[in-house]
Image (cartoon, rainbow, N blue to C red):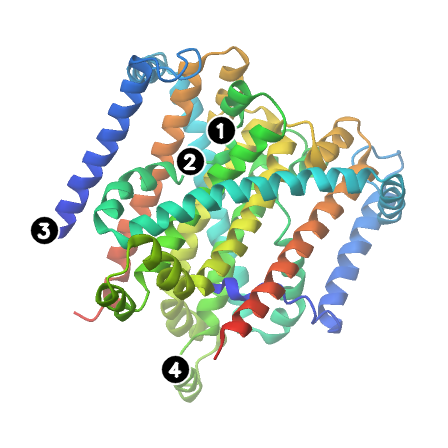
Amino acid sequence: MGRRAVHILTDICSIGTLLLLWYAATRLGLVPRVLVPSPLVVWDRIVAGFVDGILLEQMASTVGSMLVGWLMCSLLGIALGALIGIWPLARRALAPVLELFRPLPPAAVIPVAIAVLGLDREMSLFVIVFGAIWPALLATVHGFATVEPRLVEVGRALDMSRLQFIAKVALPNAAPDILAGMRLSLVVCLVMAVITDMISGQVGLGSLVVLASRSFDMAGLFAGLVLLSVIGFASNAGLQAIERRVLAYQRPS
Amino acid sequence: MPADRNGRLWRLVDPAPIGVIALLLLLWQLDVSGSDFVSDTLASPGAVLLALGRLVLDGDVLRAAAATLTAALLGMAVGVGLGAALGLLSGLFPPVAAAIRGPVVLLRPLPAIALVPFMTIALGLGLAMETWVIAFAVFWPAVTLTQQAVRQMDLQLLEVADALELGLLARVSKLVLPAIVPRLVVMLRFAAAIALLIAVTVELVSNPRGLGHEMMLAAEAFTPAPMLAYLVVIALLGWAVNWVLVASERRVLAGMRP
């Protein structure tokens, strides 16, 4: 634990230095002040936005889309991945088709989704899931494909049904892969939530950043960026902590 | 990571996936022709193909694709160049690694696309803005992957460098870089995929150039056929870039094998 404490301490120091550099640069006029506001101004803006609730609402909307999208990505991705992993015909039929859709930039699906589904929450969710399902899906397929062959034999010897095999052998075995994939999915969900906000103009930090820039409200723009990076950082760190705890059984003690 | 399954499109002769695709196309066709009114949201597969042909003949597609690729390449050059340099430094010197870990963890999850409004104010719309957004997106993976590559290098090589009393520059160019080439190639493929993705997205969001912009124009004009045609082109470009990278990666790695 001592090393972890040192890690955290150095991280705090380096991030603090970064903030100080930002402050110094605006203070000394190294960057044009119309372009980059001082961190203090941005901080005031964040506090004010939380007090009057506008920023809070936008943040809640983005985090909400991100989390709901992530849950759907995880459920669908694991289900589809398990199907492909356990059933050879599904693998043969679906894997190449998925391969066809995967390199598509998810943002390019947004105009089509708006045309077909309309400008609403469902459209955003569809796009988020389309863009962010891949890590969870591929990780599940990979985890299922790498089940120890002897475990497969054990399953056969015990006359396990397919469902039993999935629940008792394949899923626990694939858990590290799946959790890592889910963590990646969450990062992509945040990106996709922001992009759909920006393109469709729905309430959220993405459209906040766009609107702030249109009125040259640099403090508001930076407040949005700071909150986005805090959300990304916090969700990633949170999932890493969960991962460590859940996977404790896999580590030889 | 299962990223090594990339680019295996050549099992398409299998009837099972072709059946699935045929089913999807049929559903699409039925959905379009099933409605009585003239749809301004979706076009039939045939109409899309026709629109695609027209765009190719006009040269619009080529111009737009060239604009998108230029930005992706420039952004990748800037982002990978800066990122790999920082990654090398932090891989070789643990204090540097400790100093940048916090900022990397904080800034890496920031969606690059969210920087578009700021970059637009700073640089205006156009190639420069798109390049820097792509560079930002590519920078972080370049830093981390290069750093990891250096870290996982054979330590004996560094001892050799110590024994030969090589300077930093000689050490990097003669020992470190050759040793990490295979990992750098993988990093480049990853970066290229991100660069193309971000380029198209920046164009969709606001930048008036390239494939993404053309697609958005078609969508805003309620002309679904060219819109979907551009979607197909974007997908094709993605596959093509991926295919080229996988092929060249294989060639480079095969050439490295003793």
**In this view, A42 is above or below B109:** above
Q: Nearer the viewer, residue A186 or A30?
A: A30
Asked which quadrant contains residue A22, the reply is top left
**In this view, A242 is above or below B204:** below
Q: Residue at x 55, y 14 (%)?
A: A214
> In the image, what residue type sits under mark 2?
Leu
Residue marked by disc 3: A2
* Label 3: how many Cα within 10 Å (few below 14, some 14–19, many 20+): few
Give residue A135's position: percent from left, percent from top.
49, 55
Give residue B93's position: percent from left, percent from top.
25, 51
Q: Residue at x 39, y 47 (%)?
A: B85
Q: Residue at x 28, y 55 (%)?
A: B167
Horizontally, residue B248 falls left or right of residue B211, namely left
Does residue A120 appear in this view? no
Q: Nearer the viewer, residue B142 or A51?
A: B142
> In the image, what residue type sits under mark 3?
Gly
Q: Earlier in the sequence, mark 4 or mark 3?
A: 3
Asked if labels 4 and 2 share a chain, the reply is no
Q: Earlier in the sequence, mark 2 or mark 1?
A: 2
> In the image, what residue type sits under mark 4?
Leu
Residue marked by disc 4: A151
Residue marked by disc 1: B115
> In the image, what residue type sits under mark 1?
Leu
**In this view, A120 is above or below B10:** above
Q: Secondary structure at mark 1?
A: helix
Q: Nearer the viewer, residue B110 or A37?
A: A37
Q: Chain of mark 1?
A: B
Q: Which mark is residue B110?
A: 2
Q: Chain of mark 4?
A: A
Report, in whole angstroms, how far the alpha carbon at label 3 lies from the one at label 2: 29 Å
Report, in whole angstroms, how far the alpha carbon at label 1 lies from the one at label 3: 37 Å
